[in-house]
Amino acid sequence: MITYFYVEPENVGKDSIQILGDEAKHILTVLRYKKGEVIEVVDGKGSKYKVMITCAEKDLAECKILSKTLLENEPKVFLTLAQSIGKGMKMDWVIEKGTEIGVSSFIPLVTSRTLVQLGEEKEKDRLVRWKRVAISSMKQSLRSVLPDIQKFTSLEKLLSQIKDYDLALSGSLDKKAKRIKSLFSSKKSLKKLLVIVGPEGGFTQEEEKKLIQAGVIPVNLGKRRLRTETAGIVFCSLVFYEVKELG
Ligand code: SAM
């Protein structure tokens, strides 16, 4: 089985890379790689390196770059998932699975019915934890780009940035809302996509109006009401299917 390792992009030099800390310990102590062995390493910025370990210390693996590949296994579209934060570990799950299927950016979304209220410190801790989850999922799914995890964002702020996207969609339980297929039938090239998912209690009517006024298209994903985290992953999977990145 192929195993990818992670190097912080700032530790990549012209001919060599340095893997530090826990990742180095994992390579050298847990997996027992030795000097002279070849491993594959991604920098989260789109580069994958085949490298040879030249120096192995407890928490440092110095490696010589043998070859470099760009953007391997990366989707051609840039999909951002604005996921209302759910209780407990739901967002961890969304980031893990979303990274696997090809999401490029996550926005932890705060709406009026969002139940989770964290202070500034806890929000920072979550972002650190979610980055770790994304790194692990990037390696597992053989990606080379680490999805960006944006700061906690209010719906108002998100709506003020809608113009940055070629297409913005929101999950709606209204059976008359559009279906995914109808939105991807035209030949228009859509590169930057946004998917917005409501919280456990759904969007308020006021928020639904604001979404439409801002140019967001409500989309119904099917007859069954999905949990917020399921809706996020199903929605992104269907979009990736339509743009031929899944299936
Ligand atoms: N009681 C809430 C309501 O009526 O809106 C249920 C919210 S649902 C658990 C959480 C979010 O997931 C929704 O706001 C919506 O964005 C998305 N969602 C769930 N099921 C969906 C479906 N069948 N189609 C589209 N979006 C869905």
Image: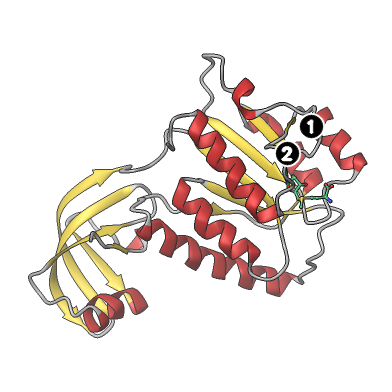
Residue 26's x, y, as percent? Answer: 30, 78
Q: Quadrant of residue 71?
A: top left
Q: Nearer the viewer, mark 1 or mark 2?
A: 2
Q: Is mark 2 within 8 Å of ligand 1?
A: yes
Q: Quadrant of the C terminus?
A: top left
- Amino acid identity at mark 1: Lys
Q: Is residue 91 left or right of residue 60?
A: right
Q: Is residue 147 visible?
A: no
Q: CA distance from mark 1 to mark 2?
A: 8 Å
Three-letter amino acid code of the residue under disc 2? Lys
Q: Against 151, is 35 above or below?
A: below
- The reply, left or right, for residue 14 in relation to residue 195 is left
Mark 2 lies on residue:
223
Q: Which mark is residue 175?
A: 1
Can residue 24 be seen by looking at this rendering?
A: yes
The N terminus, quarter of image: bottom left
According to the image, what is the colour scheme of the structure?
A: secondary structure
Q: Are marks 1 and 2 in contact (CB under 8 Å)?
A: yes
Residue 47 placement, left or right of 163: left
Which residue is located at x 55 percent, y 34 percent?
A: 239
**Outermost residue, left direction?**
36
Q: Using the image as rendered, state which of residue 57 and residue 112 is in the foreground.
A: 112
Q: Is residue 153 left or right of residue 41?
A: right
Element class at badge 1: loop
The residue closer to the viewer here, 124 or 75, is 75
* First in residue order: circle 1 vs circle 2: 1
